[in-house]
Amino acid sequence: LVLSKSDDFAIIKSNCLLNLNLFRESYLVSSSVKLSSSGYNIDGLISYIITLVELGKQSELYKCSHDLICTYPDQAISWFSVGCYYYMTRRYEISRRFLHKCTCLDKYFFAAWIVYGHTFSEQDADDQAMSSYRTVSRYFPNSYQPLLFMGMGYLNMNNFIYAEKFLKEAYKLFDSDPMIYNELG
């Protein structure tokens, strides 16, 4: 019972829900911890921002991004938020600039590298997308998500042998993501 009221527990729960593609549930949990007494709860913001993108909450993301840039201009999360806003509005070149700034401030910012790859993928620049996903895979070798997105990229390029290889590797690491099952068919 004590843990259930903890912000740390809520952040872990929100991240787990996000990994299961339960975006509404993750949003409900992450939005309850995004604010702390001194402003934003930086640790809880990543899942909050991602759920805003996934749920199409553009106005809320804009407000959050603006507040973060004004309050924490030296934090990678601020630039990630702005990059996600521009990704959401389909202005991929601008999004990449802000995501690049984010990864320069924190080269291990997992979500920024993923969204950076997605900006290329949305424009069918598969080689650049794959490069971004490979970077994430190098920095986080036990993560299934870069493997999943590489598999999806290979499917997009009609390279079914490599696609299956990467999707199966992603499945071995995390067999509960419905997106993996969708891509494997």
Image (cartoon, grey):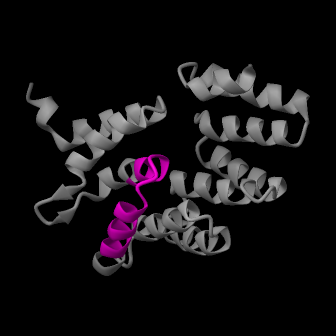
Give the image location of residue 108, x and y in percent. Answer: 53, 56
Q: Is residue 40 above or below residue 111?
A: below
Q: Judge by depth and name the residue closer to the eye, 91 or 110.
A: 91
Q: Is residue 126 above or below residue 75?
A: above
Which quadrant holds residue 145?
A: top right
- The main secondary structure of the magenta stretch is helix
Image-based side of 181 in relation to 159, left or right: left
Disc tally is 0
Q: Quadrant of the C terminus?
A: top right
Which quadrant holds residue 69?
A: bottom left
Magenta region includes residue 25: no
Q: Is residue 175 above or below residue 141?
A: above
Q: Judge by depth and name the residue closer to the eye, 24 or 49.
A: 24
Image-based side of 73 in relation to 136, left or right: left
Give the image location of residue 95, x and y in percent. Answer: 59, 69
Magenta region includes residue 52: yes
What residue is shown at x 81% (from left), y 55% (from top)? 124
Q: Quadrant of the N terminus?
A: top left
Give the image location of residue 46, x and y in percent. Answer: 40, 52
Q: Judge by depth and name the residue closer to the eye, 27 or 36.
A: 27
What residue is shown at x 34% (from left), y 61% (from top)? 60
**Magenta region:** 49-68
What residue is shown at x 42% (from left), y 38% (from top)? 23
What residue is shown at x 81% (from left), y 53% (from top)? 126
Q: Is residue 73 above or below residue 137?
A: below
Give the image location of residue 113, x and y in percent. Answer: 60, 56
Which quadrant holds residue 175?
A: top right
